[in-house]
Image (spheres, rainbow, N blue to C red):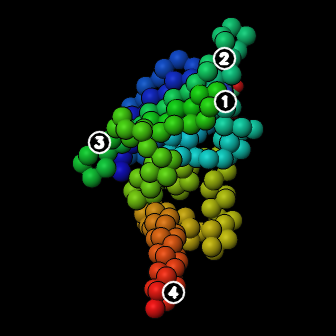
Amino acid sequence: MQIKRLRLSGFKSFVDAADLRIEPGLTGIVGPNGCGKSNLLEALRWTMGETSARSLRGAGMDDVIFAGTNTRPARDFAEVSMLIENAGEESEVVRRIERGAGSAYRIDGRDVRAKDVALLFADSATGAHSPALVSQGRIGAIIAAKPAERRAMLEEAAGIAGLHVRRKDAEQKLRATEANLARLDELIADQD
Ligand code: ATP
């Protein structure tokens, strides 16, 4: 999968709409302290479904919305759009949050669940916790990771992390079906 474009509006310090084209290859972000480099990486992770406000350096998820400055009022919503290309096909993934009302996701204009977005990225070996996104301190964390954590990173890199979610779903369906079958057996036995 390739991320081709990132569009931000009202996300953290990006109060005005900003449009960034991401070219193939390795991308580095440079700039003076506090100019918003980490905010950009966080915008990517947030759109891919990050659920932890703390890992986005906030107390609550509303903290990703532009909070205002001396000269500009706060915004009521934040929206980030990612244009991705996957196996030759382009799609647009959008996450939007409104103050006090939580997040909503869209893929190619269709309303979807957070889970659908997570699966889309997990299947393409990327996502909010992808080792492909290297933030400050991440290299040290990878080196110091326990074997089980490193295995999870490798699974994500190999694109099989999504299978765990599907397996859990399938197991739940199987248990529900087994319960239904047991109930049917009881009903049949009662009729005999
Ligand atoms: P450094 O090089 O110091 O790590 P950086 O370029 O990574 O800096 P960021 O940490 O991405 O910079 O951006 C920090 C800036 O974003 C700060 O000025 C902070 O006030 C601003 N900021 C963060 N959240 C919000 C918000 N919700 N509303 C407005 N500004 C915000």
> Assess mark 2: CB under 8 A from ligand 1?
yes
The amino acid pointed to by label 3 is Glu
Residue 32 visible to the viewer: no
Q: Label 1: which residue?
A: 100
| Between marks 3 and 4 in the image, the one whose residue lies nearer the viewer | 4
> What is the secondary structure assignment of the residue under circle 4?
helix
| Between marks 4 and 2 in the image, the one whose residue lies nearer the viewer | 4
Q: Residue at x 70, y 15 (%)?
A: 69
Q: Estimate the spatial distance between the alpha carbons at disc 3 and disc 4, rounded to whole Å.
A: 57 Å
> What is the secondary structure assignment of the residue under circle 3?
strand
Report x, y in % for residue 54. Answer: 71, 44
> What is the secondary structure assignment of the residue under circle 2?
loop
Residue 148 quadrant = bottom right
> Assess mark 1: CB under 8 A from ligand 1?
no
Q: Label 2: which residue?
A: 74
Numbered badge on residue 90? 3
- Sequence-first tag of 4 and 2: 2
